[in-house]
Amino acid sequence: MKFETVAELIKGIPFTSPERGRELYDFVLRHQPKNCLELGVAHGVSLCYMAAALDEIGAGHIDGVDLIDVPRDPSPEDLLKKCGLEKYATIHREKSSYTWFLKKKIEASTANGVCRPGYDLCFIDGPKNWTIDGAAFFMADKLLNPGGTVLFDDYNYAYGAADMATDGINHRDLADDERLEPHVKSIFHLLVMQHPDYGKFEVVNEQWAWATKTGGTERTLHVHERLGLQSKLLRALRKLRSRVG
């Protein structure tokens, strides 16, 4: 499916902008991952962009994981069906966290005490939390093939205001520094970039952070600014929110 077609079908549905969707779509077309994993799918917009690229290639599959008790309208299943892309993705739901899905996947992939990886791309886009997403990275690493890619959304996001909740994380339960520091940024710099098997680190627009399982080669960091009008507005809103918080 062409990018313009899927973009029109999911137009106006949060939370992945067409700019980010184009980047994700082009990545899948270019690298042709056979098996993908998305942790945190919400309405399934980014899932549809990836599935559309797989459809254009003619092969591939995505496991999408989210929570049972967080209803979405439209649901990711509905959105995939609307786009005619449901054969490229399977939605899995867990009660507490996608880390439990990862536990079960590691268990199912283990033989003779060794976990056999199977994914080529892992997109972590959930609660933006040090504890959950930090653990998710190490679990996903066990399932990621050599040469595979891990992508984090919300690189520079901070919880901000104490009287809110985000993806099950109650801001009132966090210390001030936990609310004000971007958790994904800390995960990327302190866990991913220090992991001996990863390289080709890339941060785009202070929003997306990429890393490749290179086996420890090409340990470089590139920071890119590719800001369209929508990205500029979103960045301004994030900065305003953090100041208010």
Image (spheres, rainbow, N blue to C red):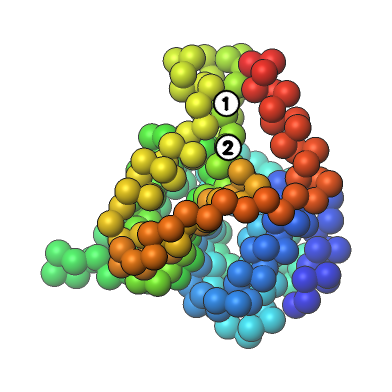
Residue 189 is left or right of residue 110, and the answer is right
- Name the amino acid type tagged 2: Asn
Residue type at mark 1: give it.
Tyr
Helix, strand or loop for disc 1: loop
The residue located at (32%, 48%) in the rendering is 194
Q: What residue would you read off at disc 2? A: 156
> Which residue shows up at 55% across the image and 76% down it?
31
Residue 222 image offset from top left, x and y in percent: 53, 55
Label ID, residue 159: 1
Quadrant of the frame with the N terminus: bottom right
> Label 2 vs label 1: CA separation?
10 Å
Q: How many marks?
A: 2
**Which residue extends farthest left?**
112
Q: Give the left or right position of residue 164, taking residue 68 as reference.
A: right
The quarter of the picture where the C terminus appears is: top right
Q: Position of residue 99 (x, y in %)?
A: 39, 46
Q: Is residue 88 visible?
A: no
Q: Residues within 10 Å of mark 2 (few under 14, many from 20)?
A: many
Residue 21 location, x and y as percent? 71, 60
Q: Residues within 10 Å of mark 1 (few under 14, many from 20)?
A: many
Q: Quadrant of residue 82?
A: bottom right
Which quadrant of the structure image shows residue 78? bottom right
